[in-house]
Image (cartoon, helix red, strand yellow):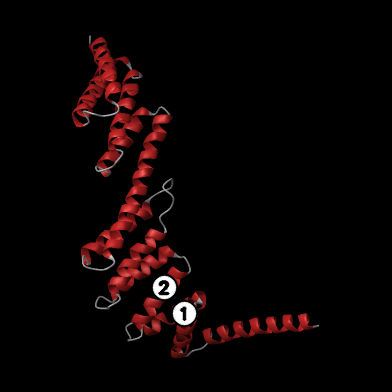
C-alpha cells in the first residue's frame, strides 16, 4: 500500500514540477521569467534555465540585466556539453560586453570550449586548431593573466596531438607503399612542427620513402629521383653526424649513387 502511495506522490510531484516550469514559460512577465531562469541556473537545471533565457533575450537586449543573462546563457550551453554553441556565445559575450570584468574569462572559455571538442589524434583536428588559435589570442591579449600558463600548456598538448596525427598519417602512406604521399606528408609535418622530437626519424623515413619511390619510378624519372635521395642523405649526414641511422645512411648513399650513375647514363 505504501508503495502505491509513494508512486502516486512521485508522479504528482513530477507533474507539479512540470506545471511550474510550463506556467513560468507561458508567462508574459519578463521579470518573472528572468528571476525563475536565474533560480534554475543556480540549481543546475541548465535546460530549464536556457529555455527561459532564450525566451527573454529580445526583451533584455541592451538593458542592465543583459550582461548577466548572456553570461549565464553561454554557461548553460557549456554545462550541457554543447561546446560548439558555448564557444560561440562566450566569444559573442566578449565582443558585446567589451568593458565587462568577465571579458577575460569568456575569451578563455570560448577557446576552452573548442578544446573540449578536440577529438582523438586519429580524427580531424579542426577543433584542436581552433582551440590553439583561441588560446594564442588569449595569451596575446592577456600575457599577465593567471590563465596564460594554462593556455600555453594546453597549446602544447594540442600541438602534440596534431603532431602525432601528422606522423601517423605519413606512416600510413609509408606502410601502404604510397611513397610520394608519404614524403609529402612527412615534409609537411616538419614544416608545421620544426622542433619535433621525431624530426630525425621523420627525415630518415623521408629518405627511405624517397629511395623506394625512385626505385619504383618510370625509367626516365629514376636518375632525377635518386639524385634527390642523395641530396637528402647528405643533408641528413650533416645534420645528424652521430645518428643511430648512420650506417644505414652510408649504405643508402652508396646504393643511390650507383643507381643514379646507372640510370643517368
From the image, tell me which residue sits under label 2: 75
Position of residue 235 measured from the top left corner of the image (x, y, whole percent): 20, 28
Q: Tell me: residue 265, above or below residue 53.
A: above
Tag count in the figure?
2
Which quadrant of the view contains residue 112? bottom left
- Residue situated in front as seen by the camera: 197 or 114: 197
Q: Residue at x 68, y 84 (%)?
A: 12
> Within 10 Å of the Cα at label 1, are there few (<14), some (14-19), or many (20+) other Cα atoms?
many
> Within 10 Å of the Cα at label 2, are there few (<14), some (14-19), or many (20+) other Cα atoms?
many
- Residue situated in front as seen by the camera: 107 or 24: 107
Which quadrant of the view contains residue 109? bottom left
Q: Secondary structure at mark 2?
A: helix
Q: Tell me: residue 76, above or below residue 202.
A: below
Position of residue 264 measured from the top left corner of the image (x, y, whole percent): 23, 12
Cα distance, mark 2 to mark 1? 9 Å
Position of residue 94 measured from the top left corner of the image (x, y, whole percent): 29, 72
Position of residue 71 measured from the top left corner of the image (x, y, whole percent): 37, 76
37 left or right of 163?
A: right
Any mark on residue 197, and which? none
Q: Quadrant of the N terminus?
A: bottom right
Mark 2 touching mark 1, by CB under 8 A?
A: yes
Q: Quadrant of the C terminus?
A: top left
From the image, tell me which residue sits under label 1: 41
Q: Tell me: residue 169, above or below residue 62.
A: above
Which quadrant of the view contains residue 100? bottom left
Q: Residue at x 41, y 73 (%)?
A: 75
Q: Residue at x 28, y 71 (%)?
A: 104
Q: Secondary structure at mark 1?
A: helix
Marked residue nearer the N-terminal end (2 or 1): 1
Q: Tell me: residue 189, above or below residue 98.
A: above
Amino acid at each position: 500500500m505504501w508503495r502505491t502511495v509513494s508512486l502516486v506522490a512521485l508522479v504528482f510531484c513530477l507533474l507539479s514540477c512540470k506545471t511550474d516550469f510550463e506556467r513560468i514559460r507561458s508567462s508574459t512577465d519578463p521579470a518573472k521569467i528572468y528571476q525563475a531562469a536565474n533560480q534554475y541556473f543556480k540549481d543546475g537545471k541548465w535546460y530549464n534555465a536556457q529555455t527561459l533565457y532564450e525566451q527573454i533575450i529580445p526583451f533584455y537586449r541592451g538593458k542592465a540585466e543583459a550582461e548577466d543573462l548572456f553570461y549565464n546563457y553561454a554557461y548553460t550551453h557549456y554545462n550541457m556539453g554543447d561546446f560548439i554553441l558555448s564557444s560561440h556565445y562566450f566569444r559573442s559575450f566578449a565582443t558585446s560586453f567589451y568593458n565587462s570584468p568577465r571579458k577575460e574569462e569568456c575569451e578563455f572559455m570560448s577557446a576552452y570550449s573548442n578544446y573540449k571538442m578536440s577529438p582523438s589524434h586519429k580524427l580531424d583536428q579542426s577543433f584542436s586548431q581552433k582551440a590553439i588559435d583561441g588560446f594564442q589570442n588569449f595569451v596575446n591579449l592577456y600575457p599577465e593573466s593567471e590563465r596564460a600558463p594554462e593556455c600555453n600548456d594546453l597549446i602544447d598538448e594540442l600541438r602534440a596531438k596534431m603532431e602525432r596525427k601528422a606522423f601517423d598519417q605519413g606512416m600510413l602512406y609509408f606502410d601502404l607503399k604510397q611513397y610520394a604521399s608519404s614524403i609529402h606528408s612527412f615534409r609537411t609535418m616538419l614544416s608545421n612542427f620544426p622542433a619535433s622530437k621525431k624530426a630525425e626519424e621523420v627525415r630518415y623515413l623521408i629518405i627511405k620513402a624517397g629511395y623506394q619511390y625512385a626505385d619504383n619510378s618510370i625509367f626516365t624519372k629514376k636518375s632525377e629521383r635518386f639524385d634527390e635521395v642523395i641530396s637528402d642523405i647528405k643533408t641528413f649526414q650533416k645534420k645528424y653526424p652521430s645518428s643511430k641511422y648512420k650506417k644505414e645512411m652510408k649504405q643508402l648513399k652508396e646504393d643511390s649513387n650507383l643507381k643514379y650513375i646507372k640510370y643517368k647514363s
